[in-house]
Image (tube, helix red, strand yellow):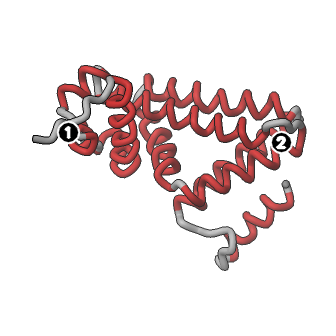
Amino acid sequence: MAVAERKTKEERRDEILEAAVAEFAANGYRGASTEAIARSAGISQPYVFRLFGTKQELFRVVVARCFRETLELFQRAAEGLRGPEALHEIGNAYVERLATDPMRLQLQLQAYTAAVEDEAIRDTVRVGYGDLVAFVDRVAGVDAATLSRFFAQGMLLNVFAAMQLGFDTTEPWAARLLAGCKENG
């Protein structure tokens, strides 16, 4: 008889969070199923609720984790750099993430959508986004207009990625907007 490996609470928690990322990214907060998350993680639905309490709390933890991972990406990209050079490398790292990890983009967009209707989720999104802005502001040391433009371009790139428009798009309106992003660094 094969003996199943017993996992720690933290290992199970991480498995649930990874399953939740996929489920929430694909189906949004309202459409996601905690039953599907549990099944994907190989555990029971009651265990999901024992660890996280509610579907809302699970979603908030997943969203906070996604923002933290993005912040860590920014930190790695800017390591040892300051000023416009740091800003440029953070932007490059984010563009690479958009190209290689569509599930995190989907989750981010689902978080913004859920924030419209749910105050607790809105607070989680505000804190996570605020942490990104604070870090970039600190390491880039640029004026408010440049900082604002950087984040506005990031949101524009999110929209492009959601529409699956590559950076070599032939659609005239999209190519024009991308040219403007390139001009702004």
Of the pair 131 and 77, the residue shown nearer to us:
77
Give the side of residue 14 with respect to residue 147, left or right.
left
The amino acid beneath tag 1 is Glu
User: What residue is pinned by disc 1?
Assistant: 35
10 Å crowding of disc 1: few (<14), some (14-19), many (20+): some
Helix, strand or loop at label 1? It is: helix
Q: Which residue is at 85% across, 55% downward?
A: 184
Of the pair 117 and 59, the residue shown nearer to us:
59
Give residue 68's position: percent from left, percent from top. Answer: 58, 32
Give the side of residue 66 with respect to residue 176, left or right.
left
Q: Which residue is at 61% across, 39% downward?
A: 70
10 Å crowding of disc 2: few (<14), some (14-19), many (20+): many
Give residue 80's position: percent from left, percent from top. Answer: 84, 36
The numbered dot on residue 86 is 2
Q: Which residue is at 36% across, 44% downward?
A: 28
Single out the residue that lies furthest toward the bottom: 170
Q: Is residue 20 above or below residue 160?
A: above
Q: Who comes first in sequence, dot 1 or dot 2?
A: 1
Pointers 1 and 2 in contact (C-beta within 8 Å): no
Helix, strand or loop at label 2? It is: helix
User: Looking at the image, how many numbered discs can be counted on the residues?
Assistant: 2
Give residue 79's position: percent from left, percent from top. Answer: 79, 37
Give the side of residue 53 with respect to residue 10, left or right.
left
Q: Which residue is at 74% across, 53% downward?
A: 92
Of the pair 64 and 175, the residue shown nearer to us:
64
Q: Quadrant of residue 127?
A: top right
